[in-house]
Amino acid sequence: MISIKTPEDIQGMRVAGKLGAEVLDYITPYVKAGVTTGEIDRLCHEYMVSVQGTIPAPLNYCPPGYTPYPKAICTSVNDVVCHGIPGDKVLKNGDVVNLDITVIKDGYHGDTSRMFYIGEPSILARRLTETTYECMWLGIAQIKPGAHLGDIGHVIQQHAEKAGYSIVREFCGHGIGKVFHEDPQVLHYGRPGTLEKLEAGMIFTVEPMLNAGRREVREMGDGWTIKTKDRSLSAQWEHTVLVTASGFEILTVSPGMPAPPAFITQPVTASPVSA
């Protein structure tokens, strides 16, 4: 059952989403060669708790069958698809890294991720990252009442595969609110006109993961880190999105977020919210 959020819920999600995105703005200057992923996590954790008064949602998050996640954010470097645990890994020139941030504010979750280049990326890494960004926005552009979840997955899959990349299928976008992960599942592949119909008041993430090689993944021994099976590069971007009466509203907006691609004609701006 997909929940329809109340006006109060939507306002709470705007605040949480804005704060999640602002963590990414804050950390951007520190994401460079020579820093460890553990230090990035420490800085984000400190900023969330001491500056924002938010709770890092991943810390000790424990779905059935998992061990508790031990850190405040996810840092997925190069061939790590998602859920990379911050630690001693030192970022070096040419790396690409996804930072996935979810904060909780007044019970509401703000969930977003961005890709970062360390120094000068390879042409392959840059193209994969940019194509993944386009895929996320193409999916978001489908969102309006009466559209279907399959419409989102279809355009993402078409764009990714046309560019020669594969879509990870084991992980997908998700409904979100006072619960971190709820219905619906937002697949990044599919057929138009299939799956649930969208209604105003639904809130979910769009977060495609593209691999430069094959789509198969493997889980590391820590029980969380997911890597590409063929060790090819992977990229991911994520926004939390509200279905509005006429289209969509991005909830994870901030002054430092990358601009939407030129094909996004609907204005994407921060709503005036007070945190």
Image (cartoon, helix red, strand yellow):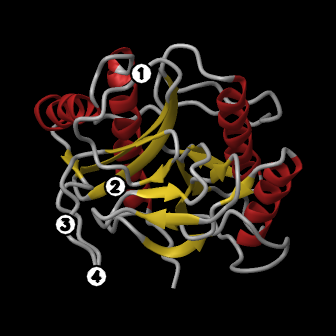
**Disc 2 versus disc 1: distance between alpha carbons?**
32 Å
- Residue nearest the observer in this picture, 76 or 153: 76
Q: Mark 4 points at which residue?
A: 64
Query: Which tag is nearer the camera, tag 1 or tag 4?
Result: 1
Q: Mark 2 points at which residue?
A: 109
**Disc 4 versus disc 2: distance between alpha carbons?**
20 Å
Q: Does residue 21 appear left or right of residue 158 in this picture?
A: left
Residue sitting at 71 percent across and 31 percent down?
124
Can you tell which mark lies on residue 92?
A: 1
Q: Can residue 148 be seen in this view?
A: no
Q: What residue type is labelled 2?
A: His
Residue sitting at 17 percent across and 33 percent down?
42
- Residue nearest the observer in this picture, 47 or 213: 213
Q: On the image, which quarter does residue 52 sit in?
A: top left
Please rate how many residues cluster around mark 1, counting C-alpha atoms within 10 Å: few if below 14, some from 14 to 19, many from 20.
Answer: some
Which of pointers 1 and 3 lies earlier in the amino acid sequence?
3
